[in-house]
Image (cartoon, rainbow, N blue to C red):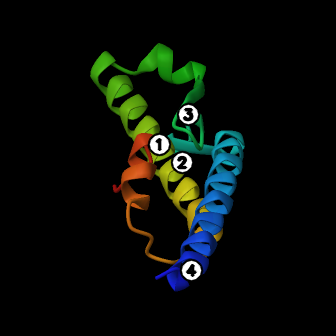
């Protein structure tokens, strides 16, 4: 009857260790830095692994010569590229922690950090 307790204790210990690693990876993800660009680097957007935009840079000549729609399209494209790179970098970081294992509930946990699926 109590034979399975050893296995259960081991599983609980592994779960605690994974939880500690996940807390650490959240910090590492927030420190990741990526950059997206559009219009031949005339618009550049910097973001972090936790999907925060930290800077947007627009080439001054673009502000003088571009129409509003073109500028809006370039900013949108650069932001989307930066966010996709941030998601990819965060997922890579998570994969290193999990060793590429398919862990039930991991995708749900990642989505809580804003990192689930593309």
Residue 114 falls in image quadrant: top left
Horizontal arrangement in the rendering, residue 106 relative to residue 9 (left or right): left
Residue depicted at x 34% and y 56%:
117
Q: Residue at x 56, y 41 (%)?
A: 41
Res. 118 image quadrant: bottom left
The percent position of residue 89, horizontal first and vertical second, equals: 58, 56
What residue sits right under mark 4 in the picture? 7
> Where is residue 31 shown, x and y percent of the image?
71, 41
User: Residue at image x 69%, y 52%?
Assistant: 20
Question: Residue under circle 3?
Answer: 45
In the picture shown, does residue 42 fall above or below 12?
A: above
Would residue 51 be visible to someone looking at this image? yes
Q: Earlier in the sequence, mark 2 or mark 3?
A: 3
Q: Marks 2 and 1: CB-CB under 8 Å? A: yes
Tell me the crowding category of disc 2: few under 14, some 14 to 19, or many 20 or more residues within 10 angstroms, Cα based. Answer: many
Pointers 2 and 4 in contact (CB under 8 A)? no
What residue does disc 1 label? 83
């Amino acid at each position: 009857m109590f034979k399975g307790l050893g296995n259960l204790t081991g599983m609980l210990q592994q779960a605690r260790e994974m939880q500690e690693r996940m807390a650490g990876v959240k910090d590492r993800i927030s420190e990741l830095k990526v950059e997206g660009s559009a219009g031949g680097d005339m618009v550049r957007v910097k973001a972090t692994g936790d999907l925060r935009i930290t800077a947007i840079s627009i080439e001054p000549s673009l502000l003088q010569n571009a129409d509003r729609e073109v500028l809006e399209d370039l900013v949108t494209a650069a932001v989307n590229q930066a966010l996709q790179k941030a998601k990819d970098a965060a997922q890579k970081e998570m994969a290193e922690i999990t060793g590429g294992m398919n862990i039930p509930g991991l995708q749900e946990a990642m989505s809580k950090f804003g990192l689930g699926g593309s």
